[in-house]
Image (cartoon, rainbow, N blue to C red):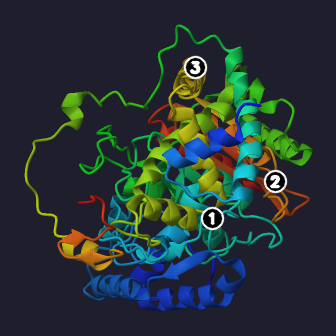
Amino acid sequence: MPINWTIDGVKDALAAKKISARELLADFYKRIEAKNLQLNAYLALTPDRARRQADSIDNLVAAGKALPPLAGVPVAIKDVISTRGTKTTCGSKILENYIPPYDATAVERLEAAGAVILGKTNCDEFAMGSSNENSAYGPVKNPLAPDRVPGGSSGGSAAVVAAGLAVASLGTDTGGSIRQPGSFCGIPAMMGSYGRVSRYGLIAFASSLDRIGPFATKVRDVAAILQTIAGRDAHDSTSTTVPVPDYGAELAKPLKRPRLGIPKEYFAEGMDAGVRQKIEAGIAVFKKLGCELVEIRMPHTDYAIATYYIIATAEASSNLARYDGVRYGLRVPDDSLLAMYRKTRGAGFGPEVKRRIVLGTYVLSAGYYDAYYLKGQKVRALIAQDFRDAFTKVDAILTPTSPVPPFKLGERASDPLQMYLADIYTVTGSLAGVPGISVPCGKIDGKLPVGLQVFGPPFGEARVLQLAHAFEQAGGPEV
Amino acid sequence: MKISREDVLRVAELAYLDLNESELETYCAQIDEILEYIGKLNELDTAKVEPMAQVFADDQSADATLREDLVVPCAVAEDVMQHAPDPEAPYFRVPKVIER
């Protein structure tokens, strides 16, 4: 049986009765059983739920009925996204036994479109990290280079797709947590505009930045998953009514000589030489496709990391205040209520989460709010303005996804600031709210994957997908 | 020094977060380094810049995001109580808060 399934491949095989949804599911679980011990990418599997869904798809096939767009497609869900009746731990000890009483809207929509949910994927604790080493349940290994990290925080969601243990998956992106692991695992990975996908059921890290988005092996499948989960949801007031175009139809359209911006600031010092060489080769592919390349300036880029780590930690310190041991999750008992809070949080949160709660509380505290939090919000406005200015001159922006290729497990774990600095190319788009995709752009020495990032204007997902698809078709992933 | 040991202690207290001696020491040094780095934002004159708290799409006027205040069924109480650390339905039990 093949490993490299695509969404259309699954649908065609089901429709032609070459395989049943149950057989396909069993095959995926067999492979997961064989490989997951080494990869540590799945934290939990949901076989009962998956079989029920597979059976309902097989019943549709047997009855000769039309199949929904994701019929029988095995997918995985990052463990910060709520799944009814299945543990959702956020990679944290504090939620080790937490079972949500409802499904996230994105999960509900995937299942309604016929997808089969295989299980929950490992991630950095509360999505805080760039290497997946901050999970309370151990790091994920990169399936392309097992001594290296898969990226983070959605490392498990990237690894399962790259290893053929799911056809597609959902991750979340707050400062690069979809795009960077996509880059590290050599697969396309996308965050839509802020507000494009409902956050209902996504356990909050930084609410003004958090977004749910897809991983798959081809841009076409990324588009199909985004199509399914995008659109207004009454349960999330920040989800918008902006219409969702037919992304698949947009992919088929020829490029009309788009103008692509190359921001000078993203190609300054600090980029690995191997990454630079691949990105330059990738940009040449766009040139060959007839795109016009324009050098642009985004002068506040250098301030994005500082801004991001003020805003993200401030919002996190507020969002994570809910973990107090009263209503759900871990409780460390004590005779006094306040001591119970302190002990529960002290024992339940891991080092990176505690660090960010302390930093976030500090930047919001009396006497420091103006100097840090307010300043951060103002610089965020300047970074967003950089993007608005750029999109008056160009249709999309090309950058590397990460300044470095996948690094070795443990190599960067001891220095938080160095780890934060590696998010430089992704946090900008997070702060501005624009859509971005990372698409595979060659491998250094044929081994370590590089990702090229395409940013589009707000709600320009179709354009971003179309460019990434054209790049993929033109051999971009093999440069 | 941007942040002292006492600052970290005070902040941990605000956040109801128990930190042990070695955590205190590590976080103090690391957060000091991070704040030092964040200080680069002071290179920018932002006196006339409006702070940005949220990304809003064009359709997100109050009219578009507000809804009728209707009662809708939400039958999750039983599930929630079942998985609570110390439930006594319909209550969550906590240590005594008020001394008589």
Residue in the image at 30% along x and 47% along y: A236
Q: Position of residue A466 (x, y in %)?
A: 55, 44
For label 2, the residue is A405
Instruction: Give the camera-side residue of B29 and A407.
Output: B29
Q: From the viewer's perspective, is A183 left or right of A82?
A: right
For label 3, the residue is A382
Residue in the image at 50% along x and 68% along y: A94
For disc 1, the chain is A
Examine the rendered structure and indicate whether residue A357 appears above or below residue A328.
above
Q: Which mark is residue A144?
A: none
Q: Nearer the viewer, mark 1 or mark 3?
A: 3
Q: Are marks 1 and 2 in contact (CB under 8 Å)?
A: no
Instruction: Give the camera-side residue of A462 and A240.
Output: A240
Mark toward the start of the polypeptide (3 vs 2): 3
Helix or strand or loop: what does disc 1 sit on?
helix
Mark 2: few, some, or many residues within 10 Å (few <14, many ≥20)?
A: many
For label 1, the residue is A158
Distance Cα–Cα, label 3 vs label 2: 29 Å
Mark 1: few, some, or many residues within 10 Å (few <14, many ≥20)?
A: many
Mark toward the start of the polypeptide (1 vs 3): 1
Q: Is residue A476 visible?
A: no
Query: Identity of the amino acid at label 3?
Result: Leu
